[in-house]
Amino acid sequence: MSTPPLYLASSSPRRHQMLKKYGIRFKAIQHSFDESSLDYSDFSSPRQYAKAISKYKARSVSQKGWILSADTIVVFNSRIYGKPRSFDDALKTLLTLQNNTHHVISSFCLVNTTTEQCFLRSAQSTITFNTLSKHDITRYIQTYEPFDKAGSYGFQDCPDILIKAISGSMNTVIGFPIHLFIPLIKQLQLQ
């Protein structure tokens, strides 16, 4: 009996690259879940919120087999910073995060649409930003256009002046806790 295919319900090039780097075979698909339909205040913690988004993304696809979806959020002072809506929104977020420590939570959901097995995992890393000038932040946004990234920045393309310290997995910050995913797919014998 062959293993059902693994579908990645994410358009994130960073997640695609990470799975390929670790030799994980998948087919990319789109989810149809509207993330703005969930209210953060309905959840007991940022982790539960991130896990719920991942789960709803996975459940929104129609393919049969194993569906993998993921989500990443940035949390500072109990507020969630998602993808910026504009240049000004990115600037405001990065001005808020500079010279402070925030958390990055990445979650994933792996669900088998035939057997209804569902696995939810999340990991948290902590990032401290340096003190930055408005000019430095503006130049970063203009150069890297981080409009598709939670918290208005991408760890993988941050200049050294931006990040002072990191605690936890860099892959979690980039957007997928691969260290939690690999043992799971080995256990399930998916690869």
Image: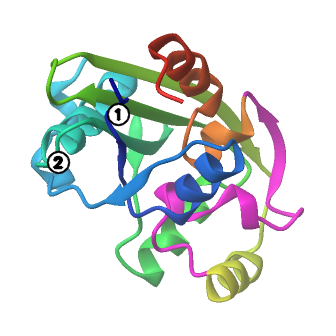
Mark closest to the chain's N terminus, 2 or 1: 1
Q: Quadrant of the N terminus?
A: top left
Of the numbered discs in the image, which one, if any, rests on residue 133? none
Q: Position of residue 182 (x, y in %)?
A: 60, 25
Q: Residues within 10 Å of mark 2 (few under 14, many from 20)?
A: some
Q: Which residues are magenta?
A: 145-168
Judge left or right: residue 106 versus residue 42: right
Q: Position of residue 5 (x, y in %)?
A: 35, 41
Of the numbered discs in the image, which one, if any, rests on residue 50? 1
Q: Comparing marks 2 and 1, which lies closer to the viewer?
A: 2
Residue at the (50%, 71%) spot, across then down:
90
Of the numbered discs in the image, which one, if any, rests on residue 63? 2
Please say whether residue 167 is one of the residues in the magenta stretch.
yes
Q: CA distance from mark 2 to mark 1?
A: 22 Å
Q: Nearer the viewer, residue 100 or 167?
A: 167
All told, the count of numbered labels is: 2
Q: Nearer the viewer, residue 17 or 144?
A: 17
* Residue type (three-letter) at the residue carrying disc 2: Gln
Looking at the image, residue 98 lies above or below residue 139? above
Q: Quadrant of the C terminus?
A: top right
Q: Secondary structure at mark 1?
A: helix
Q: Position of residue 3 (x, y in %)?
A: 37, 29
Dividing the picture into quarters, in which one does residue 188 lie?
top left
Q: Residues within 10 Å of mark 1 (few under 14, many from 20)?
A: many
Is residue 4 visible from the viewing direction of this image?
yes
Residue at the (51%, 22%) spot, across then down:
185
Q: Secondary structure at mark 2?
A: loop
Tag 2 near tag 1, CB within 8 Å: no
